[in-house]
Image (cartoon, helix red, strand yellow):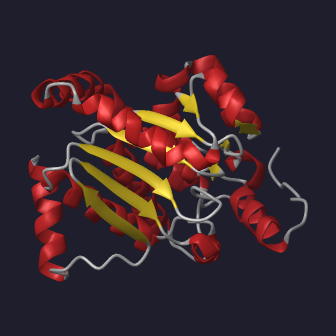
Amino acid sequence: MTKGAQAEARATNKSNPKMPYTTLQIGFAGEIATITLNRPDKRNAISAAMIADLLAALAEAEANPARILILTGAGKAFCAGMDLEALKAVATQSPTEHLEDSRRTARLYRRLWSFPKPTIAAVNGPAVAGGCGLATLCDFTIAAPEAKFGYPEVRIGFIPAIVSVFLTRQIGEKRARDLLLTGRIIDAAEALNLGLINEIAPTPELMGAAHRLAKELLYSSPLSLLKTKKLLRDSAAPELDRELELAIAESAQMRSTEDFREGLTSFLEKRAPRWVSK
């Protein structure tokens, strides 16, 4: 268990010894841990509470003897991006609060990317914006045929700054530019072709496919898996962390612009944006 995970677990245990999650569920079955995003009425949208729950659940899963982690969503969506109420609150935030929000998001993504045990995302439905980041930062991503993926931030005055750091490493710069600059939503078949996901499984068999992969990984040496993930993480971490700092600053700065405010307002009012920048 890393020092960071130990600190997260201590902080979580101190504030809530029983770790009652309000936005997700965590379960353990033998050597497989499963985290299920559990806000189906909100399409499992990301809120500050969910970020805190995910960080705590990742610490709990790391501390547990389970060797493989599966991440999935309850209901018809995997994760629809930022929560609507959180979006409304963003409009009133100060520059300092924008920076804190960006850092919080970056911390979650980096934590999932660097999680020491193998991770599998079982994407049961749309995974958009921040939800797409959660789905594709796992080591393996298995999707149902009806799953959708994309980063539509530029269409509503955001910039997909933080996730871009990871996406360019996953699918290459040219393909990342396509997704990030157009903001288009793609289906599971195209995501597979781009290398954004590893496999498509029929919806009724999605969790079965995730468990089959988990069991295949369990045949490998536990130490070898941990060491391989550490090697991959440590070789990329210095440059990735430098780029994340730049992305955090750019993301926070964009939230203070007129385009951001207009994009957010038009999205909430369900109308076409009237951009003010040239």
Q: Residue at x 38, y 48 (%)?
A: 70
Q: Is residue 10 left or right of residue 193?
A: left
Q: Is 128 placed above or below 8 here?
A: above
Q: State the image quarter where residue 243 is shown.
A: top left
Q: Residue at x 75, y 55 (%)?
A: 156
- The residue closer to the viewer here, 229 or 158, is 229
Q: Residue at x 52, y 64 (%)?
A: 46
- The residue closer to the viewer here, 158 or 123, is 123
Q: Is residue 165 visible?
A: no
Q: Is residue 177 left or right of residue 30?
A: right
Q: Quadrant of the C terminus?
A: top right
The image shows residue 95 at horizontal and vertical percentages of 49, 65
Numbered circles on residues, count: 0
Q: Is residue 212 left or right of residue 224?
A: right
The image shows residue 155 at horizontal and vertical percentages of 77, 49
Q: Residue at x 57, y 23 (%)?
A: 195
The image shows residue 136 at horizontal and vertical percentages of 50, 38
